[in-house]
Amino acid sequence: MPDNDGPGQDFAKRAAADIESHGGTVHVVDLPGLPPKGDIIDWTGTAEDLHALVDKAVNPPAITFPVADLKAWSAIAAQPKGFTMPGFVPEKELTLATGAGGANKSTFGQQLATCVAAGVPMLGIEVKKGKALYVTAEDDDARLHWMQSHICNALGVRMTDLVGRLHLSSLRGRLGNELATFDVEGKLRPAPSFHVLRATIEASGASLVVLDNAAHLFAGNENDRQQVTAFVNLLYSLCQDLGATIILVAHSNKAGDTYSGSTAWLNAVRSQIVLSRPDGSIDPDERVLSLGKANYARQGEELRFRWHNFALVRDEDLPADHRAEIAATIQANHDNDLFLRCLDVRNGQERAVSENGASAKTYAPKVFADMPESKGIGVRRLEAAMDRLFRMGQVERGYLWREDRKDKFGLRRTCADPAPSAPTPRADPALTRCADPALTARQPRAHTHPISKDIPGAAFQGPAPDPDRDSDLDADGDIIGWKEG
């Protein structure tokens, strides 16, 4: 029973060490309520109090899990789950945001953080206003600046209004970004970056934290259920201790699953949102946000929008004339592709077609209208596509192959836009210089429509960024256009 001062505590430690070194058992009993430097003579407790203290020291109570106080609960009304983005992102939870490359997960994360900081709707949905932190390990500051400028423009928000409310952090090129490591037994050990992240959340006061992405922050085995679950619980500790809502961005796998790795990624979280391109859509910029897992919302909820000029927008938020022109351009590009696909098949079969309407049996639009590759769009739309492709310089009449000792001419792609490898029933089709990629260097095909070149946006300047398409990247591997201006 040490005196209530430093020397008393030190003496107790020395005495305990001496006793234990000789095989004894020690229980230190601190007497509550002692004045400074007081000892047992100054204690005012009873014999029963002392007996209880000794019994507790000798027989400490078992450590148990925390148990809810139902009596306290009965005195207050239960509250429904709050949402940062109603229907999609529950409050003070970890949400897994997944999708394939080019689905614009990063854009979604940065734009949602901006909407929360500015207190403006995200794709038509009211969000809970608060401070936000967006952390990326993939983009540098220049890229963040570029994206933020376009997001602010799309939302009608001034960047100066976000000062102190929106915090953007780039970890690109930084070593040691992993938030945790795992020892030889597979047990998680928080890494220095986790403590830095926690301190950053506290300093910024962020109620929404977007982490982009899991591949840079998780250093374990994504197929190991124990490691994945431990990592998810580590992030949940930030939700619990700091009251933060966390979105962890992650890639889907190539097998078609909405996540990559162990099912623990999906099982350990209470919410998953998936960004994707709608199945069967002819619009390369259309996107859909769906609920992959929803413990606090209705499964199957969807939100459709588009990637447009480096931001995400709903069609109904665009001017009516702009929407009509986008739709017309999407259909035109779609019809152009179908026309070229039919042309590739016919030329691959060495069955020439003509641009001349007087050649009834070989008139390309009429022939193509009966082919399954044209998707039933009809002669009139195929005629319009042929006219556009001629004006855009993508098709021409020219030499195709030699047949029966005669040169065969007909409709073909131009040399500036050679045909891709097309399915053909012939084992050895005669390739022309314009049709053979080995003879003519492949050039990126334009996605523009002549009447729409002056209108900004992905529908007119090419589809949204996709790392699988080389034509969207410049020599440095950056998205074409974003460094300009």
Image (cartoon, grey):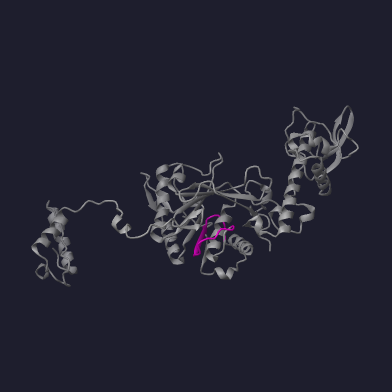
Position above or below: 69 against 186: below
Residue 414 visible somewhere in the drawing: no
Residue 133 falls inside the magenta stretch: yes
The quarter of the picture where residue 264 lies is top left
Residue placed furthest toward the right: 358
Position above or below: 27 against 360: below
Which sits in the foreground, 73 or 257?
73
Which sits in the foreground, 46 or 81?
81
Q: Quadrant of the N terminus?
A: bottom left
Q: Residue at x 43, y 50 (%)?
A: 232
Q: Position of residue 412 (x, y in %)?
A: 82, 39
The quarter of the picture where residue 70 lies is bottom left
Q: Position of residue 269 (x, y in %)?
A: 44, 48
- Is 176 displayed left or right of 53 in the figure? right
Q: Which residues are magenta?
A: 123-140
Magenta stretch: dominant secondary structure = loop
- Is 289 displayed left or right of 340 in the figure? left
- Is 275 displayed left or right of 481 in the figure? left
Q: Position of residue 423 (x, y in %)?
A: 72, 33
Position above or below: 376 against 388: above
- Is 217 displayed left or right of 382 in the figure? left
Q: Residue at x 85, y 43 (%)?
A: 396
The quarter of the picture where residue 397 lies is top right
Residue 416 falls inside the magenta stretch: no
